[in-house]
Image (cartoon, rainbow, N blue to C red):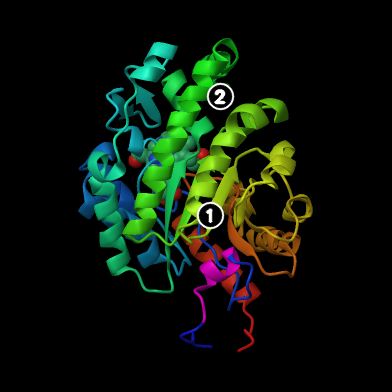
């Protein structure tokens, strides 16, 4: 069936819990190292160079779209990108590392962010370049890190399994911590809004380290900053997606947020997530990225299970439960996209 003028692209329809031609699919980290064409460009440039150069960042954003019939593109950038101009000595190895992490109330006060149009105009230029190349059917997703997850890297200064330094700061200096989360919320409202104004048609907040917090600390520190961002973005009209990674125990609180779509990691079946979130939110997810290493029949069965768990009601964006692994065979992703589309193809009432 060919799309008609009034029909939303499948991705936007699902975000709005409306029926579409098929369940839309995109995957976290779809622009990245599992693609040989990414590795070829990356051999010639550093990761920061690629992010700071609109022609390169646009090219990497489009690489997976050329290869697979994905239903959305995601901007090639990083959650640390908007912090690039803060003078903290940001680098990637391969995860974010900071020469001068934030460790005191004075460090927090010294942080002065500038509007995205001044600090990271290249990101907005990348958005404009990409949307020019994308078919209407394939919306561009803009994104930002959620304040708590940015806080983890800013305070720890590098990746970690447990982020002990960041969590200690939360408890040892709760006022300075709240102030930092507040500043990060302000920066993110500006940065995410600028992406939508430049042409991103949905906006996703990655809270990769939400699961490090118990419900009380999550409610006290992480949630208010996320709520403030989502409230501010509501006026823009682009669907909002929030991904609280390892957030199964936090979903009752997430259900109170003003958000269209909640990303679910692979640890929680989508049927259970939907029961907790209620009928007013769409879900995104949640195949274990490791399933892409299974033989085709087992992969197909695992994909079918995710679709069944999502249930027949509209409002499912198929995705992995976290980023695609860099050792994944791209042909397995081609199979996944094709299988999701074929398995969910339906007639849309006019
Ligand atoms: O999803 C996409 O294709 C868009 C691009 C994107 C990247 N990072 C590119 C990237 C997105 C959406 C992100 C988000 C991001 N970055 C998150 C949230 C999502 C998540 O994974 O939980 C986080 C926590 C980061 C911080 C970060 N950046 C880490 C931990 C790493 C190392 C990861 C790894 O796979 O080794 C990065 C580097 C990074 N960000 C790469 C890419 C393509 C690899 C860079 C390289 O080529 O060396």
- Residue 124 % position (x, y): 28, 52
Asked whether 251 or 104 is in front, the reply is 104
Tag shown at residue 267? none
Query: Any atom of ligand 1 within 8 Å of the CB at mark 1?
Result: no
Q: Which residue is mark 1?
A: 240
The residue range painted magenta reads 7-15
Residue 328 shown left or right of residue 300 in the figure: left
Q: Label 1 to label 2, Cα distance in Å?
A: 28 Å
Residue appearing at x 30%, y 40% in the figure: 115
Q: Quadrant of residue 79?
A: top left
Q: Nearer the viewer, residue 95 or 87?
A: 87
Question: Which image quarter: residue 157?
Answer: top left
Residue 172 position within the rendered picture, expressed as x and y whole percent measured from the top left? 57, 10
Residue 161 numbered tag: 2
Q: Residue at x 68, y 58 (%)?
A: 302
Q: Main secondary structure of the magenta part?
A: helix
């Amino acid at each position: 069936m060919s799309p008609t003028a009034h029909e939303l692209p499948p991705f936007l329809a699902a975000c709005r819990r409306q029926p579409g031609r098929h369940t839309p699919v995109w995957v976290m980290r779809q622009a990245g190292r599992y693609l040989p064409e990414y590795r070829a460009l990356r051999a010639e440039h550093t990761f920061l160079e690629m992010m700071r150069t609109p022609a390169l960042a646009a090219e990497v954003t489009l690489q997976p779209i050329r290869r697979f019939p994905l239903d959305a593109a995601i901007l090639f950038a990083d959650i640390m990108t908007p912090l690039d101009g803060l003078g903290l000595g940001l680098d990637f190895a391969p995860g974010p590392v900071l020469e001068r992490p934030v460790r005191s109330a004075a460090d927090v006060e010294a942080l002065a962010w500038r509007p995205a149009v001044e600090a990271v105009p290249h990101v907005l230029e990348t958005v404009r370049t990409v949307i020019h190349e994308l078919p209407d059917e394939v919306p561009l997703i803009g994104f930002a890190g959620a304040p708590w997850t940015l806080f983890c890297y800013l305070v720890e200064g590098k990746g970690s399994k447990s982020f002990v330094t960041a969590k200690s700061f939360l408890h040892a200096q709760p006022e300075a911590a709240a102030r930092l989360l507040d500043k990060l919320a302000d920066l993110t409202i500006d940065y995410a809004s600028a992406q939508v104004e430049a042409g991103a048609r949905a906006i996703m907040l990655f809270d990769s380290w939400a699961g490090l917090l118990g419900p009380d600390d999550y409610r006290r520190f992480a949630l208010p900053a996320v709520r403030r961002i989502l409230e501010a973005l509501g006026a823009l009209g682009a669907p909002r997606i929030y991904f609280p990674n390892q957030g199964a125990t936090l979903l009752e609180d997430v259900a109170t947020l003003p958000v269209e779509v909640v990303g679910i990691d692979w640890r929680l079946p989508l049927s259970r997530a939907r029961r907790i979130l209620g009928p007013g939110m769409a879900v995104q997810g949640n195949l274990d990225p490791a399933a892409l290493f299974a033989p085709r029949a087992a992969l197909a069965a695992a994909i079918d299970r995710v679709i069944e768990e999502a249930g027949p009601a509209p409002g499912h964006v198929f995705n992995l439960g976290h980023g695609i692994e860099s050792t994944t065979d791209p042909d397995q992703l081609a199979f996944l996209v094709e299988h999701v589309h074929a398995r969910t193809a339906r007639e849309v009432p006019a």
